[in-house]
Amino acid sequence: MDTCSSIALLLRSGTPSPNDRNLAEILDFFGIPWTALTVSEARAGNVASLTASHSQFSILTSAPCLAEAVQPCKAGAFPTWLTAAASVFVYGFQAADPCRALLRQITGDPEADIHGIDARPITVSVTDAFPGMCGPMSALRIQLAPGAVDAALVIRRGGELQSIVAAPEGHLFAGFAYSGVRFFADASLAMVDIRERAATYFDVRKRFAGAVPVVMYLKWSFRGVCWTSSETSACLIIDDPLLRPRYGCLDFGELLQLADKQRLATTIGFIPWNWQRTNRATVAAFRQNSGKLSVCVHGCDHTRSEFAERSADLLDRKLKTAKCRMQSLLNKTALNHDNIMIFPQGVFSPEAVSALKRNGFVAAVNTKVAPADDASNETSLADLWSVAIVRYGGFPIYTRRYIDHGIENFAFDGILDKPCFIAGHHELFRDHARELTEFLRQLESLRWKLCWRTLGDAVCRSYGVRRDGGTTIVKMFAGQLRIENMEAATKRIWVVKQEPQVVSLKEVTVNQDVVAYEYMDGCLRLIVDISPGGTADIRCVYHEEPYAFSDSETISYRLGVAVRRYLSELRDNYGYCRQFRCRM
């Protein structure tokens, strides 16, 4: 039997509590194998039978449950099943005698205590001494909003203490070894429910407790079995500019200098309506610097809420018009584009996402994470933690952030193995991009392997990997996956992709050759062998119905679009730049 390197034991009382269920959902999200262990089963010595097929196990439990489990033990003496664990993660220390007694027992500190934290702003510090667990969040100081944390542990002496996340009130997350057991104590009173619906992006400044510590621990403790990534793809995405030497505060010459200095890659969200309004020299600079500069599709006419539309016919007409214009840009300038959509103002409907799939788009990249109509929102916190949202028809929506979301949110995304996509407009380059340059410096200082790529390349290289015994499984999100084999021997991988609408799939190709696949439990599955030094380019090709729409746009609509575009450019090139004294 193939053995999995590690399994999680979810220690609980009899009936699972809401926190037990929330923790189980998080384990499933990361692909971590787990089994429930009741207190009575632990006392009966059933742990060995539950972990027999695994080389090691770690225990996750609430403080009240662990207090119940170790209650019969003498001070400083732990049961065999506890000392056999690789580590023990404990959360939910209530300000009550049983939890206080447990904290003192497992730390060896007779004065250890639990302090509640009122709903007020608080600054926390992440240690720089444990990069294997804290990763990109190492050494950060984070200003949290009121209610983001709820308790702190006061531990001054006892076992070998390592503070992981600290606040003036005490430790929010700490590791310590005592009496042969390695504990990790999380002061969070409850675990976040990742099934919860989400209307906006996840913000660690507002949702720290029950989220950040457990993610840090799981990604460290189960690094050999959970979904992970060896690197983080990054791209700066600037919406709206025309391909001219200057647009508003954006000077493409300065952008290229910044790209050379910062190893930066930038993709322009190009409005297809502007396809005839380009500068030859600027387009040539894009062609000559294809590894640093690219364009993708930003709407069609860029009218307000044009992709909040729910009519399939109207959406298909918009997308086919956009594709036709981008093809005209290619024919005129020889400048290709990334087949990725950025919705204008971030607004979209579930039907728009399905329309992208049947019109040959690889992915969408967006700032807003939920459809415009609240009633149709199915986005969950789990979707926000994933590499991409695939909630809507299995089509991927990669999320991106503005720099005012804070370096801590980009860092937490890095722990989650999400790509680092920075969103902005020409204003990011005011004052010679001083604010942007400082933010890029902060990104580069984080402890991660950041790889700058244009958007199309970054999307194709953003995927999840995990080991299951001797098998390497790769989770594909976008319609295209590019994976390399840098090893000296042929690498065999199992590729899986969620695909609820398999009838829309025409074929799957690997390096342009059609290959066989199987479909099981709502997922595509195929085996790919990659030769030493080789690359596998895997694509899902969907049926694209040849709609033949007549041009139904009225003269007044066309005039309105033109007026909107010219007024927007007038605002960006003159109004905004004069206000902020951008050099023109």
Image (cartoon, rainbow, N blue to C red):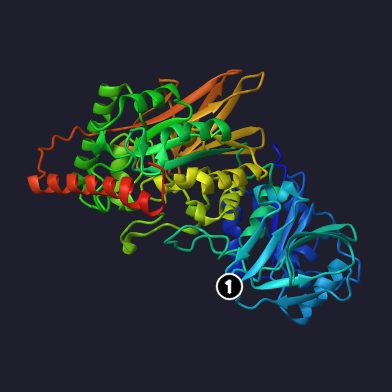
| Residue 322, position as x, y percentages in the image | 25, 37
User: Is residue 193 depicted above or below 384 in this figure?
Assistant: below
User: Is residue 192 depicted above or below 333 in this figure?
Assistant: below
User: Is residue 529 depicted above or below 473 in this figure?
Assistant: above
Does residue 172 show up?
Answer: yes
Which of the image's four quarters has the C terminus?
A: top left
User: Is residue 106 depicted above or below 135 in this figure?
Assistant: below
Q: Is 82 placed left or right of 554 in the picture? A: right
Please tell me which residue is depicted at 47% across the width and 25% down the height of the picture.
537
Which of the image's four quarters has the N terminus?
A: top right
| Residue 344, position as x, y percentages in the image | 31, 48
Query: Could you tell me the amino acid type at mark 1?
Result: Pro
Residue of label 1 = 146
| Residue 40, position as x, y percentages in the image | 75, 68
| Residue 526, position as x, y percentages in the image | 49, 30
Disc tally is 1
Q: Is 116 placed left or right of 530 in the picture? A: right
Please tell me which residue is depicted at 28% across the width and 33% down the height of the picture.
543
Between 232 and 519, the residue placed more toward the observer is: 232
